[in-house]
Amino acid sequence: MKKDLYVEITSEFLVALKEGVKPWVCPWEKRGMLALPVNMTTGNPYSGINVLLLAMRSYQAGFTSNEWVTFKQAKASGATVRKGEKGTRCVFFKPVEKNVVNENGETETEAYTVINSFTVFNRDQLDGIEKPAVEPTWAPIADAEALCEAFDCVTVHGGDSAHYIPSVDRIHMPEREQFAKGEDYYATRLHEMAHATGHKSRLNRELIGKFGSDAYAFEELVAEFTSWMVCSRIGLEGEMQHKSYLAHWIRILDFDKKALFKAASLAQKAHNYMLARLEDAQQDQAA
């Protein structure tokens, strides 16, 4: 029987969630190496569900590098995969077309997408290649502030809760001094900004779910992934001060084997939107 990658991968995440662990909140920040995973050979970043898969694997294995490579790429670079090392599964999606006969007996083309997998290894699993010295180039607080300033959504300070109101497209935040440290303030604000990317004037996600509903919890999962990606990208180590929705996420993933993939895809788009605002601001400043 052919493996169902949607079920297998979702099941892996469910195991962690049911243990009270967010498997994507891992690995590199604990070693001062906060960064999203990239391909060691091309330098290209991984995206979507693969970001989460590699984050989870790094958390489990304790890897200290965010660089990954296929067996063939490792060999081409002069490195070898250490004997006994286990690879990590990533996936890709391939569009497929086939001819089908409709109810009228006519032949028409049906388009759909199939999921396939490939295997990568972390740089920590290789021999015959030097590990580069880590030289962080980010300025997390400055970048977070620049992103907040550049983001096209009004933010109001006051009160005791952080939340986004889609109907008026406005973010509400507690005062900065109410947070234990600056990083926590920005991590929380970036989470609310992640919600705001879903406004109809931006990425137009469904933001109509009521608190406690599956739609509401799904949007929280998208925002969770998005803010984690953005924080990782700019090197921000902060605690997001908002409610946890683990039980709701478990219910969603148990019910829909593709929900995790959908959330990761939407989060990637939101991450890209937010980082584009930061890059625009940095270019304007440099001009």
Image (cartoon, rainbow, N blue to C red):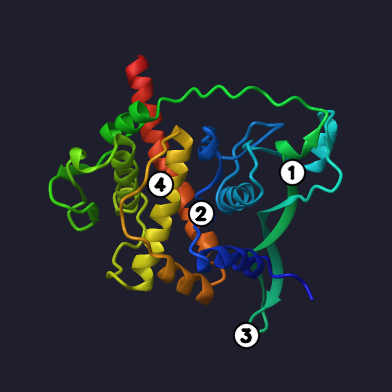
When the figure is inspected, residue 16 is found, relative to residue 183, above or below; the finding is: below
Residue corresponding to mark 3? 103
Instruction: Return the mark for residue 265.
Output: 2
Q: Are marks 2 and 3 in contact (CB under 8 Å)?
A: no
Between marks 2 and 3, how big is the CA–CA gap?
A: 34 Å
The first of marks 1 and 4 along the sequence is 1
Amino acid type at mark 2: Ser
The first of marks 1 and 3 along the sequence is 3
Between marks 1 and 2, how big is the CA–CA gap?
A: 23 Å
The first of marks 2 and 3 along the sequence is 3
Residue corresponding to mark 4? 227
Amino acid type at mark 4: Ser
Q: Nearer the viewer, mark 3 or mark 4?
A: 4
Q: Position of residue 189 (x, y in %)?
A: 29, 44
Q: Nearer the viewer, mark 1 or mark 2?
A: 1
The first of marks 3 and 4 along the sequence is 3
Q: Residue furthest left?
A: 158
Q: Nearer the viewer, residue 109 or 147?
A: 147
Say which quarter of the image contains residue 168.
bottom left
Between marks 2 and 4, how big is the CA–CA gap?
A: 14 Å
